[in-house]
Image: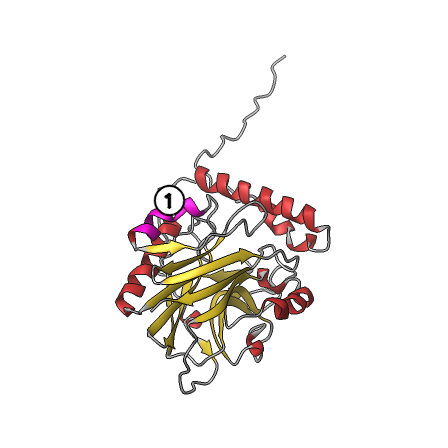
Amino acid sequence: MRLPKISLPRPNLKAKLPRPNIGKLLPSTRKIDYSVRMKLYAVDTLLLFLFNQMTPSGRKKPTTPLHFSSMDKLFESPRSEPGTIGTTFHLLAWNIQMGYLQKEVLRDFPEIKTEIMLLQEVPVLEDDELPLLANTSPFFSYAPNLFVKKRSKRYDCVHRGQLTLTSVAPLDVMMFPLTRVTMHNNHQGKQSYGKQVALYTKLRTAHGTLGIYNLHLENQAKASGRQQQLQEVIDHAQAQNDTYLIIAGDMNTILGSAELSNIVKKAGLQRAKTGPTRGLFTFDHIYHSHNIRVSAKVISKQSSDHNPIVAEVTLLP
């Protein structure tokens, strides 16, 4: 008796590796115990790091050009006569996790409000509305970096981006795109599409100008990708020739501060000393020029997966 032949499909060894999807579960876990959430974030971060290391770096680039014309719009408060920021002020850097815990964010924000605030993952809930928290300061600028195609529990907004709030009117505000360094070929997902941008604000001081960059670097990339994006921001800053310079935000440094340290030192910048900002990891940083003194601390808040950094900044003459 002959046994029938059984043909087994050959494994596709070149198939694209799927990104670990535990992160998709995190928004739905926002009501569970805070310590458990922090452990889940730590696991998600480790999985993402391993995924980025295993993903081949030689993938073909997209053959079609990336057009984001609808995302190139900068939103800002009406221009006013530029004010002068004091030589000593406080600065906040915080990723608010798309405002998933909006009530908690609105509750915690007044306690850590400062003269200059650099926020990431700030949602615009409806087309005719201002970004969340934009009305808490006299002057704001907002640069979207992710647009939602299909609203869901995870993406319950029109778009989200970086929001800079200042207590005085700026001299200038601009946004510019950063090179796309994500590990994936496709820049568009089923629910959203986006890119990384830098949001620049120039303020007048008693001794010159202060250039501030609000950043949210790519998380789904190797360290070299984030290094490239930061270098582009530094190159832009050098062309502006401001007296003082601050670069801050969510750098997504899975390997910690060492990931960007060489570029920071080469540019003559310093890093404000802080502790972990997302679980056990230090994703958020404040870099500054040598003529600025910064004393920073991380404040524990349960309204986001990132803890905010609050810093006292002194501009040296």
Residue at x 34%, y 67% (from the top left corner): 244
Which secondary structure lies at badge 1?
A: loop
- Secondary structure mostly seen in the magenta stretch: helix
Residue most toward the bottom?
81
Q: Nearer the viewer, residue 135 or 151?
A: 135
Q: Is residue 189 visible?
A: no
Residue stretch rendered in magenta on the structure = 257-265
Q: In which quarter of the image is residue 65?
A: bottom left
Q: Can residue 91 be seen in this view?
A: yes
- Residue 33's x, y, as percent? 73, 50
Residue at x 45%, y 65% (from the top left corner): 313
Residue at x 44%, y 39% (from the top left corner): 53
Q: Nearer the viewer, residue 40 or 56?
A: 40
- Give amino acid for label 1: Arg
Magenta-colored stretch includes residue 261: yes
Image height check: is 286 above or below 166? above
Residue most toward the top?
1
Magenta-colored stretch includes residue 11: no
Q: Residues within 10 Å of mark 1 (few under 14, many from 20)?
A: few
Left or right, 70 with reference to 134: left
Residue picked out by circle 1: 59
Q: In which quarter of the image is the C terminus?
A: bottom left
